[in-house]
Amino acid sequence: MKISKVEFIGSATSLDACPKPVCAEVAFAGRSNVGKSSLINRMVHRKALAKVSSTPGKTRTINFFRVNDAFYLVDLPGYGYARRSKEERSQWPVFIENYLRRRRTLVCVVLLIDASIPPVRSDEEMNAWLHHYGVPVVRAFTKADKARQGDLARRRQSLDPSGAEPCVFVSARTGRGIDELWKVLYTKINASDVPSLPPEE
């Protein structure tokens, strides 16, 4: 995948504060510290486009990155991390769910799951929630370089028994699966009725 241009567009904590929905968007969701930011950086060949932290739950906003002047990659706040105030935690599902359910230019959600451990309850709940609301999903199992082949097969089976939905095993460290993930996402973008290029200003 040739990346000629990537730029940070902005952050939002509500649907109204998001950039205008002018082109296709692919959102990345996953547990805190699953490696969303690291994967996005690897995909666009940048070292620090998306901020990476060793502290779980660092990303608190919806962050938009415009790629090749054609579409957005969207980094969502991580779920399943409790070291926030009760009031702040209660607000996360509201603006995230509003984005996932109402954003008309959202093409699909890349659901990131840590391949080095079995899916946890929050992964299963997010997987079920996306299915319930009919949000198109691509599962990306991160840290695949740290898991055995047999474990990878079991990880996929646990969340998609039919094996019918897109699933990619990736590693931000080694680059495994990055090209395959891009192919899946481009198929999703091209098959949608959302324009892949924004209109002229």
Image: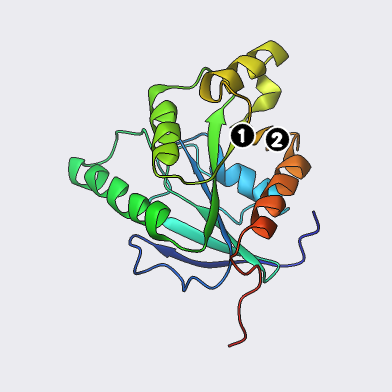
Task: Say what amino acid the circle numbered 2 marks.
Answer: Arg
- The residue at the point 72 percent across, 15 percent down is 149
User: Spatial distance from mark 1 to mark 2, Cα to Cα?
Assistant: 25 Å
Q: How many marks are shown on the rendered structure?
A: 2
Q: Which residue is mark 2?
A: 173
Q: Nearer the viewer, residue 98 or 144?
A: 98
| SS at mark 2 in the image | loop
> Horizontal and vertical percent for residue 70?
67, 68
Quadrant in which the C terminus is drawn:
bottom right
> Horizontal and vertical percent for residue 94?
28, 51
Query: Badge 1: few (under 14), some or many (20 or more) residues near its Cα, within 10 Å?
Result: few
Give the label on residue 126, or none.
Answer: none
Q: Is residue 88 above or below residue 161?
A: below
Q: Is residue 57 above or below residue 71?
A: above
The answer to whether one can see residue 58 in this image is: yes
- The residue at the point 75 percent across, 38 percent down is 175
Give residue 130's quadrant in the image. Answer: top left
Residue reaching furthest to the right? 2
Q: Which residue is mark 1?
A: 165
Label 1 or label 2, whichever lies nearer to me, is 1
Query: Badge 2: few (under 14), some or many (20 or more) residues near its Cα, within 10 Å?
Result: few
